[in-house]
Amino acid sequence: MPVIQTAIVYLPDRESLHGAGLKVAGLTVLERLLFTATRAGVREIYLPTRLTDVLPPERLNQRGRLGHAVRWLSDRASDEAARLRESAVLLLPAHTVVDPGSLERLGRATANSYVISLEETKGSTAPILRIPPGLTSKLWRRLVHGELIGEELEAALRRENARLVTGGGYAVAVTDPNSARQAGAKLYQSLGTSADGWVDRILNRRCSRLFTHLLVYLPVTPNQISVLSLALGVAGAYGFWNASLASALVGALFYELAVILDHTDGEIARLKFLESPLGKWLDFSIDTVTHGALVLGMAVTASRSSGLWGMGLGILAAAGIVMSAVVARTGNASGESHGPVGHLLRRMANRDLFYLVVIASLIGLWGLPSLLPWLVGVLAIGSHGYWLTSVIYRAWGGR
């Protein structure tokens, strides 16, 4: 079922006008709400002109796709106004930070003749609603003029026995700096991905959020952070190239910083709605280059005790890393994770196993140099085994 594609932003109370202009993670609350609505599938969003002080039209025009989606309400007679008055729409309070998934679920809810409310805003004077055409028409003039209608909507919800939809996310009304911090905390808690491994959840995300907190208010783009991550990753690989224990420890530190920044660039992109095809390609390419270079560095070090066959295993392992990255990327895109085999393959696609490889390499340099060629050999077998198993599993329909 398609998402309702029209939304109207309203002002619940006096505090909402101030709250809409407060910043949360680099964007004003109103800008964040508008971006979130477009992310949830809303194609046209209407604002009362009272909000031009919070979001001047000239700044809106600089927001790319947002400028094409947002329009200003007018009480002048027109075909557009007539269509809106007779439409089911989403009503969005101007000062609320909400996740896209919740808005999408509300927009997909059935029962066009009923008021449907997001359960996370139940009992508040700033509900997020899907309203039928009759209520849109009744509220039209008050919406156009940006009147404060929060209490009226709350009463209407009780009177009309509104249905509820559980969004499963968060909805925070921002009225002051304290509630802005609460909204920011909800945003940062939502930044993890299904690809995160145990080390990512326990360590890397905690560290990356510290960098994100610092960088989100600066004029730094996610792609610039990605390039810095690449530089650190290459420096880390160089530390493992013909390594001593000391240089490998420094290399491991650079690798860890590269991983943290790899998380940070994605977090900044999601927080500021700056995701792009180029950014996704950079993220994939840099991650693959970093891990491939690390494996080659380990192989060069291993070849001191194993000769050319150790280097050959390293080249084979690096090729397996590249193939595994390609297969994991296409597999994640198609959502292939059903059944115990699919679950295992998904778990193997994160960085946890590679951290074990780095630790084993450090142990080898510390006192077991004969371990290094075997480690590179295990990498070669494991990486090719992963992508070959994934391809076969996919060919069998993920059973």
Image: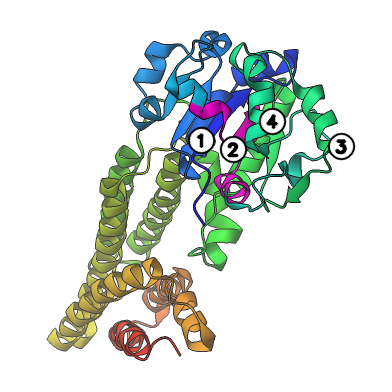
Sequence-earlier tag: 4 or 1: 1
- The answer to whether 267 appears left or right of 177 in the picture is left
Question: Which residue is disc 1 drawn over?
Answer: 6
- Between 42 and 350, the one lying in front of the other is 42
The residue lying at 69 percent from left, 30 percent from top is 135
Which of discs 4 and 1 lies nearer the camera? The answer is: 4
Sequence-earlier tag: 2 or 4: 2
For the residue marked with disc 4, what is the amino acid?
Leu
The residue lying at 48 percent from left, 71 percent from top is 352
Marks 3 and 2 close (CB-CB < 8 Å):
no
Q: Position of residue 380 (x, y in %)?
A: 28, 84
Characterize the local packing of mark 1: few (<14), some (14-19) or many (20 or more) Cα atoms within 10 angstroms: many
Marks 4 and 1 close (CB-CB < 8 Å):
no
Sequence-earlier tag: 3 or 1: 1
Residue 235 visible from this viewpoint: no
For the residue marked with disc 1, what is the amino acid?
Thr
For the residue marked with disc 2, what is the amino acid?
Ala
Question: Which residue is disc 4 drawn over?
Answer: 135
Characterize the local packing of mark 2: few (<14), some (14-19) or many (20 or more) Cα atoms within 10 angstroms: many
Question: Which residue is disc 2 drawn over?
Answer: 88
Mark 3, secondary structure of its residue: helix
Q: Which residues are magenta?
A: 83-107
For the residue marked with disc 3, what is the amino acid?
Arg
Sequence-earlier tag: 1 or 2: 1
Question: Which residue is disc 3 drawn over?
Answer: 158
